[in-house]
Image (cartoon, coloured by chain):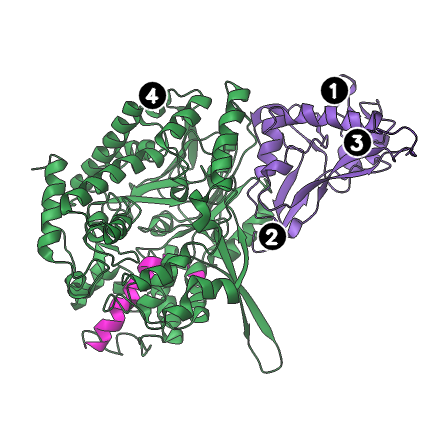
Amino acid sequence: MLRKVLYIDLSKSESWIAERQDLFEDWMGGTGVGIRLLQEECPAGTDPLSLKSPIIFSIGPLNGIFPVATKTVATFKSPLTGELGESYAGGRLSLALRFAGHEAVVIRGKAERPVYISINDDDVKIKDASSIWGIDAPTTGVILRDKEPGVGRRSIIRIGPAGENLVRYACVVVDTYRHFGRLGLGAVFGSKNLKALVISGTETVEVPDPKRYREVYNRLYATTVKTDVMEKYHDIGTSVNISVLNWLKGLPTKNFQLSAFAEAEKISGEMFAEKYLMRRFSCAGCPIGCVHIAALKSAFSTHHEFEVRKVSYDYEPIYSLGSNLGIESAEGILKLIDVCERTGLDVMSAGVVLSWATEALDKGLITSADTLNVSLKWNDVDGYTKALENIAKSPNEFYSALAGGADYAAAKYGGSEFAMTLGKNEVSGYHTGPASIVGQLVGVRHSHLDNAGYSIDQKAAKKPMDPEAMVNEIIKEDNSRGVFNSLVGCLFARGVYTEDNIIDALGAVGIIRSKDDLQDLGKRIFDEKYKFKVQEGFDLTHAHIPRRFYETVSTLGTVTPETVDEMLRLYRRKRGWN
Amino acid sequence: MVESRAEAMQVEAGRTMLEPEDKDAATPAKPKLRRRLKVAHPERCIGCLGCMFACSRIRTGTVSLQNSAIKVQTQGGIEGDYRVIACRACRDPPCARACPTGALEKRPNGSVVFHKDLCTSCGECEKACLVGAISFGKEKKPIKCIHCGACVDFCPHDVLTMEEIPAEGA
């Protein structure tokens, strides 16, 4: 397996390929290689939306070769947080990169006018995209499908108007219904005049010992489909958690004013599955099919004329655009998700920004003149629809502020005690206890998936854990996920990829690693990421924690600032940062 | 799982075809059968491409989409249905008829075998198959389904099954 990096310079309209065997040898692939390339490419203090700010895509040694190793990681400087940007997407992208023969792609510079990049194996073309600038993300995909080769094996990633207009939490839509959702990669695309990237390839991967490969493959495949390790994702999907977290008093409701939603049953995963679920599908290389698609049929006249929208849903958007905005119907949530899909907004940040704005309007921090008379009230689907469209267009100062994120808007208008961000990233859908708060705050990308603090809280609800035990768990997950994200596997399959299975799978592609090697790698990756974060100004000792977290009862009862401070102190000590 | 599914299936197919298990010779001979891959429920496909990877992995020992004889494609993005393209094991196979050198040869039981040494890479077989079940890989040789069933085990939704159809002359 040749381990190559494809460099594309949009300013110079040039591309070249470099063999970087050492880089992959030392840092495995995926996020390990991603952070190292970011350090090489992004000088300290770079404006994330300037031409010096790079975009890096990387995959790892198992992508396309073993089941559920389906993700690609994007590494960049986040325009939302001003520090480490790291986002993961599934679909067909990792497969397309694998067969095009590029384990990493670095995009530099800025194109003179709107362009898209077309990659077919080693052939890279930068093509004019002026005629599709301004077109929504799904339609852009449809147009490029007809223009580019590689049907059945290509990946098409693109931005919508939100990315073009530099909304700081604009996403990049991958194929259909998959996204580099978090931390604003879409705005970085927009800042480079980069509308889309289409990639396909025809390479074949030879494994050193096909018999051994088939053996390991069969074992991992059997674990994936024949055991209950991934059952949750297969059946109702992640949205099954709406009922669970509501019952546990961990479901953020109306901007975290409450941790249970009286109308939760109407927006539960069971309700979506029974009334709207149309089909499920998979990322290429995964037999699970966790992507749940709802058919939303609505009449647009009284003469039996209907439009049918097909909308993907999951737990997080149902929280952020649902319970968090007091939306009492599955249909209303699907409509809001659809707006984000078309405009290219991150559903999670968008929902949390709107819930802050709703409270800010209610409290008189902003006025209806600011909102352009758009009503921002809990459960007002039409008002929220208009507000989302306005955020994507940023027609006035207020919507421009919302386009900067909840932290940015609160700095301007007030209300930072209920702007639900950690590390400037809008938080995920868990008010489970202190591990969720601390986990997202210390996490390298301030995501719930950095170390799954929400899961630690839920374990603690069954069997009490002291702050130190929680911190130990967070550190363990921080590090081990760095390894898994170097491969780059889907975190839903982390139960399949035990340390032993990772070692076997790597062995089957000729990469020999011990447990010690992997643990060392996880720690090194974490350290490099923190170096970058600190260099760009992230300071854990002065991080803002909205007071709302301490006011609303969580799964583990009321969280006190003392507990969180204690955990942060322990965390810093165990990391050796005193 | 059988180690080399392709070989095992070929052996099995051969036995079914040539030596039907007629334990009681006095009863009338059962019709001779051959096995065929059937795309039974394409509407259940979730696009995991497990079948394609199984085909290249088990039949050729490589990781490849190009080397797969079965193809799964989207039709206008995955908002639409998937299209599963597989050899239908035609009764009067146009691919074999189109082949000018006998590289694709119809056997007495109706199945088609490929003789690589006779192939001139002319591409006539690919053109002859309206379904699109024959593709050309990097070697410029036709990639054709041998109806071994390797893909069936890696379809999580029973889109694919093996069925028995009467062998020619049965």
- Position of residue A82 in the picture relative to residue A9 (left or right): left
The percent position of residue B118, horizontal first and vertical second, equals: 79, 18
| Badge 4 density bin: few <14, some 14–19, many ≥20, Cα 10 Å | few
| Badge 3 density bin: few <14, some 14–19, many ≥20, Cα 10 Å | some
Mark 4 or mark 1: which is in front?
1
Q: Main secondary structure of the magenta part?
A: helix
Can you tell which mark lies on residue A22?
4
The percent position of residue B52, horizontal first and vertical second, equals: 60, 36
**Residue A227 counted in the magenta span:** no
Q: Chain of mark 2?
A: B
Q: Which residues are magenta?
A: A342-363
User: Do marks 3 and 4 share a chain?
Assistant: no
Asked whether the residues under the numbered discs 1 and 3 touch, taking CB atoms below 8 Å apart as contact, a structural biologist would say no
Amino acid at circle 2: Gly
Q: Chain of mark 4?
A: A
Residue, disc 3: B124
Residue, disc 1: B116
For the C terminus of chain A, the image quarter is top left
- Sequence-wise, the earlier of marks 1 and 3 is 1
Report the Cα–Cα distance between label 4 and label 1. Answer: 40 Å
